[in-house]
Image (cartoon, rainbow, N blue to C red):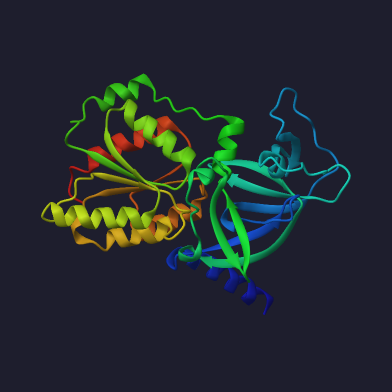
Amino acid sequence: MANESVLDEVFQRSNLAYSNEMEMLTFYLTDDQLYGINVFKIIEIMECPKVVTKTPHSHPVVKGNIDFRGHPISLFDLADGLGLTPIDYRNTLSYILVCEYSNTIQGFLVSRPNMLINKSWSDIIKPEGTLYDQSYLTAIAYHNSVSIQILDVEKLLVEIIGMDTSVSEELIQQSKNLSADQHQVLLVDDSKAACSMLGAALNQMNIAHTILNSAQEALNLLNKTLKENNGKCPYSLIFTDLEMPGMDGFTFTRKIREIAALANVRLVVHSSLSNKSNWEKAQEMGADDFIPKFSPDRFAETILKQLERSTLPR
């Protein structure tokens, strides 16, 4: 019975990709506000060890390195990164969410984990306004009338670690072989950091592009352009994130592949959910490729490869 229970849980989680749902772990920081993170990013939850090795000249949010399965990983204090009172991990019981982002592993220090909940992406709200544009908040959900803030951890990591947005000269030269008026790229991502990197790379390659922050917006735009252009799509290639309020990237990919007029449009998933199972799910939905965030050259290489293939029948 225990094995059946585990298998049922694995089956339910694997099917979240088909139902526009996210399973999130909720947790607390030092302000007693409830926060949430996608469980697909979490490798392990552990108590903060007594030994945290401080790294000289590191960012103040990086408290040092900890040992995780025989390898050192960086420990980020999420509360400190948000401008809250730092977590007193040396004198109080605190926890670490060991997460995988873009093929790298980090530890995020939290006051305490709370519980797992499932939420439809349609119930997850993207906040609007200039105040939120500058914040680390990417979405809000509600559970039993309590708000759950979903953080833009990608933006936080980029500001702490930095992000290279430059494409190599060799790839820029290769992009000059593309006809500037032949191809357009549609980018769909609610992450400010991702949009900044993707837009910068495409500008360097001189490729026309449109950036949208929601899958529903993108779907509306594609349907509109098909009507206005007698069933022809101006976009040769679409990049989509997976985690987006309203409609996730899995659902968006599936809906794109249900539209016959978009059959020859290439579609690539660009996500920090970089484990193999997500690539396999994306393929099942109809994605042509999957690349982890954030590598300008990997992004540029994928653009060149997919635009070349866009001229061929599927």
Residue, far front: 130
Residue sitting at x 61%, y 68%: 143
Q: In the image, residue 18 lies at what x, y percent?
A: 43, 66
Task: Indicate whether 154 appears above or below 37.
Answer: above
Q: How many marks?
A: 0
Residue 218 shows in this picture: yes
Looking at the image, which is closer to me, 6 or 192? 192
Residue at x-position 54% and y-position 70%:
12
Q: Residue furthest top?
A: 169
- Residue extending farthest left: 230
Quarter of the image that includes the N terminus: bottom right
Residue 164 placement (x, y as % from top left): 49, 27
Residue at image coords 78%, 30%: 54
**Nearer to us in this view, 283 or 268:** 268
Is residue 263 visible to the viewer in this orientation of the structure? no
Farthest residue, direction right:
91
Residue 312 shown left or right of residue 58 in the figure? left
Left or right: 122, with 53 as reference point? left
The quarter of the picture where residue 85 lies is: top right
Q: Nearer the viewer, residue 10 or 243?
A: 243
309 or 262: which is nearer to us?
262
Q: At which x and y percent is residue 235?
A: 23, 45
| Horizontal and vertical percent position of residue 210 | 30, 41
